[in-house]
Structure formats: structure tokens, C-alpha cells
Image: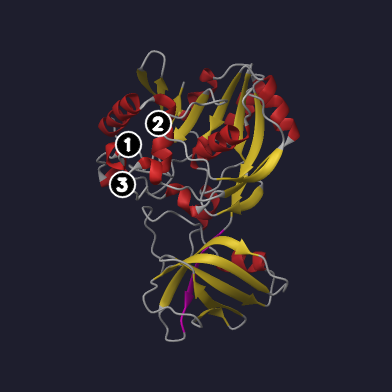
Amino acid sequence: MKVKEFDFNLPEELIAQRPCEPRGNSRMMVVNRKHESIECRYFRDIPDYLDTDDVLILNDSKVIPARLIGSKPTGGMIEILLLSNKKTDSPRSHTWEVLLRPAKRVKAGTVIVFDKHSRAEVIERTSEKKWILDFKTDRTFESFLDQYGRAPLPPYIKRNRTTEKDFQDLLRYQTVYAKMPGSVAAPTAGLHFSETILKEITSQGIRIAPITLHVGYGTFLPVETEYVEDHKMEEEYFDIGKETARLINEAQRVVAVGTTATRVLETVTDKEGVIRHFAGHTNLFIYPGYQFKKVDRLLTNFHLPKSSLFLLVCAFAGKELIMKAYEKAIEEKFRFYSYGDCMLIL
């Protein structure tokens, strides 16, 4: 399959720059695979589509404030996106793989300054886009990020990096049930849930079970190979607990919130359809032709063309039906991507 077969044109004005307020007021497209029907609702209606025998799977990973703005000794501003932590023995030294912008004049030994007590040194370049930085600070790294870190918004959400960090983004680019720090991008399907909606769901006797997958930046990038089968997913850490595994194995129907939850469930399900407690890494790439073993229903946002997320959704509901749904979403002016509206696939 060629990647270009999963392309579509999206008007730029439909790319959401701010989340819907309050949570739960976003629109929700309901796509029924059996009847090939499409219905436009609001996310607050989601309890109408859940039954007492369902288990709702939420990714409880917490987004860290992984975007930093520093300056080189020459005074030039430089933007850093933390990707993964490389463990060191020193409590005051923290080594990370990062993306840098601009990176044209960066080389090993370049120092990036935040204040007189906090700086980072470029150690080496690991690929065309990635670098290794060693941070040195007089405080815990968590405290350093609390002071200087910004929400790691994807590049299609425009923010002025010369201004102070946006505390609203730090709050809203995070699910209300986030618990385990480690993601550098949000599991965006979960951004629609409010505490009120979660309480309504549990009051109906519907069980909710957490899993953890720390979302990496690569999850949201377009697939750049010519053929779908040649794309390689980056590994991401996940953990599924014993109680969650038990609830899933007892459920009549499994409703996954997001592609991240979906990939974890499909990774850990064995040939008999049983899930067991497991922690590890997954690079599972789901694209059309994949046979789902565990997920029965999927809540997801509207994704970038030619992305691994869009390919997963096409695998779950069929390319033809999803293309039809996306055409309808554009016609009805649904809001797209991380801060946008959502789709429930039945």
C-alpha cells in the first residue's frame, strides 16, 4: 500500500488552535461500522453509547512540560523539545535526547542558558533531527521543568515562543485523569473527558480501567516512507496492571480511549484473546489489514493525513468509511487534531 492513498486535503482554518471550553462540549462524530452510518453529536452524549458490560480504557500517562526556550551565548533563542531521558548517576545532571530549533549552527559543545544556575550542553547529534543534551541545574529537574517548561504542543498549534509560557495550555493539554508522568505528547482522545462526565459514566455502572503508555513525539508525525509497510514506529513504554487486565478479560466489550490505549491492548493480547499484567515497550504499527484482537469500540480525535494514527483508524473502521466520515467532518466544520473534536467508532 502506498502512503499517498491515505492523504486528504484539510482547510487550515479547521485545525483547532484552542480546546473547546468547557471540556465535554466538543463535537463527536459517531461512526457505526455495521450500518456504515455517520451521526453528529456532542461528546457529553458519550454515556448514551456505553453499556454496563463495557469497560472503558483510559491512558493515564501525564504530559511533562517538555518544551523549553533557552538562549545561546550569542543571544540567539533556541527551542528544545525533550524526547527521552538518558539516565545518569549525577543528581544534578540530566541527559536527554531532544529536538532543537533552529539547529543549523548547533554543534557539540554549544551551551544553552536558562539562568545563571541552569544550562544545557550539546553532547552530540544522533540523527538528522535529534541531539543529546546534558542539563545542569542547582535544583531538581522536576523543579527546573516547573519553572521553565511549556506544554509540548505539536507544531500545527501556533504559539509565540517569545512570550511567557501559556498556563492554560499546561492545564488543557492534559487529561483530568493524568497520573503517571512521562509523555511528551498528550493522549488527545482523553482531553474531552471532564470529572462530571466520568462520574456520570461510573454512576451508570460502567467500569473504567487505566493503562499507561508514555506518548512519544513520533506518534503524531506523518509517515514519510513511500509504502506503508516500510514505516517503523518508535518504541514507547507501557504498563498494564493486574486489575485492569482482570476487568478487560471479564468485559463483554472493550472501549479504547485513543490510539495509545488501542496499541497497548493489541500488544498484550495473546492468541486466545486474554490480557495479562505486563510492562514493557511497544512499537506496534497498526494499518489496514490488521486483525484486531481485543478492542471493540474506539474513541479518537481527527488525525493528520498520512499519519500512523490515521492508518490505525482506517484499519479499525475501513478506509472507505473513514474517508467518508472525514469528508463529512470537513463539510460540517468539525475541528481537527489535538485540540479538536472527536470520533466514536462503534
Q: Residue at 69% of width from left, 75% of height from top?
A: 92
The mark found on residue 1 in the picture is 1
Calculate the distance from the C-alpha at mark 2 to the C-alpha at mark 1. 9 Å
* Left-right relation of 305 to 203: left
Q: Main secondary structure of the magenta part?
A: strand
Q: Is residue 97 left or right of residue 207?
A: left
Q: Which residues are magenta?
A: 65-72
Image point (51%, 83%), residue name: 109
- Which residue is tagged 3? 226
Where does residue 100 sit, x and y in percent of width and height? 44, 68
Mark number, residue 80:
none
* Amino acid identity at mark 1: Met
Tell me the kind of residue under disc 3: Glu
Of label 1 and label 3, which has the lower sequence position? 1
> Which amino acid type corresponds to the residue marked 2 in the rendered image?
Pro
SS type, badge 1: loop
Indicate which label's residue lies in the foreground, 2 or 1: 1
In the image, 136 versus 331, the foreground residue is 136
Question: Can you identify the residue that label 2 sits on?
Answer: 288
* Kind of element beneath mark 3: loop
Q: Of residues 204 and 314, which is closer to you in this image?
A: 314
Decide: marks 2, 1 in contact (CB < 8 A)?
yes
Badge 2 local density, few (<14 within 10 Å), some, or many (20+)?
A: some
Residue 1 against residue 254 in the figure, above or below: below
Q: Residues within 10 Å of mark 3 (few under 14, many from 20)?
A: few
